[in-house]
Image (spheres, rainbow, N blue to C red):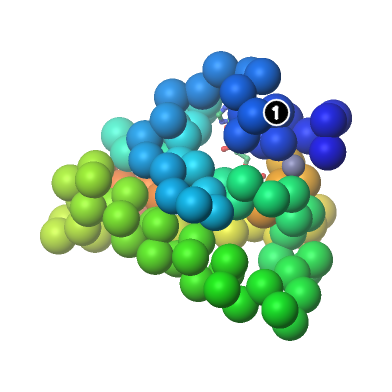
Amino acid sequence: MSDCIFCRIVAGEIPSQRVLEGGDWIAIRDINPAAPTHVLVIPRRHVDSIAALEDGDGQLAGALLLAARDVARHEGVAESGYRTVINTGAHGGQTVAHLHVHVIGGRQLTGHGTA
Ligand code: AMP
Ligand code: ZN
């Protein structure tokens, strides 16, 4: 989707700080970090959200979780702990309509969100 900011980041049309990448995903630093570590795992293929995943997307969905694990190890927060957040739709607070997994850590988190 040419008007999707994360598709444009995947394509390299918008600059980002890449942390890691895999065959189906990239991981970039969030532009407005909520914690010392705040990385977004983004599938290379455009999917609006979890709500738009299809039954055949299990491999992609699993790859995103494994990617979050790898990002946490890479960032050195695997032992101290971290939060993974996937916002879906309006009530979920999703602001970018391209599925992404937040990996947040490096400080004690409270509540349940990205704050
Ligand atoms: P969400 O609210 O779950 O849709 O999260 C979207 C996230 O994308 C927010 O944490 C933003 O700070 C982040 N974001 C938006 N634009 C960019 C960008 N160009 N590069 C990196 N992160 C971004
Ligand atoms: Zn997209």
Residue found at the very far front of the displayed protein: 23
60 in relation to 110, above or below: below
Q: Is residue 80 left or right of residue 6?
A: left
Q: How many marks?
A: 1
Residue found at x 71% / y 36%? 7
- Residue 91: give x, y in percent of width and height: 77, 58
Residue 28 or 11: which is nearer the viewer? Answer: 11
| Rendered-image quarter of ligand 1 | top right
114 in relation to 28, above or below: below
Quarter of the figure with residue 39:
top left
- Residue 59: give x, y in percent of width and height: 56, 73
82 in relation to 96, above or below: below
The local crowd at label 1, few if under 14, some if 14 to 19, many if 20 or more residues have their Cα within 10 Å, is: some
Label 1 sits on residue: 8
Residue found at x 51% / y 23%? 16
- Residue 57: give x, y in percent of width and height: 67, 73
For label 1, being within 8 Å of ligand 2 is answered yes
Residue found at x 54% / y 54%? 24
- Residue 13: give x, y in percent of width and height: 66, 19
Q: In this rendering, does residue 27 appear at all? A: yes
Q: In this rendering, does residue 114 appear at all? A: no
Q: Is residue 113 left or right of residue 37?
A: right
Q: Could you say whether the residue bearing mark 1 is in a helix, strand or loop?
A: helix
Residue found at x 14% / y 60%? 79
* Amino acid residing under circle 1: Arg
Residue found at the very far bottom of the displayed protein: 55
Which quarter shows the N terminus? top right
Residue 18 or 103: which is nearer the viewer? Answer: 18
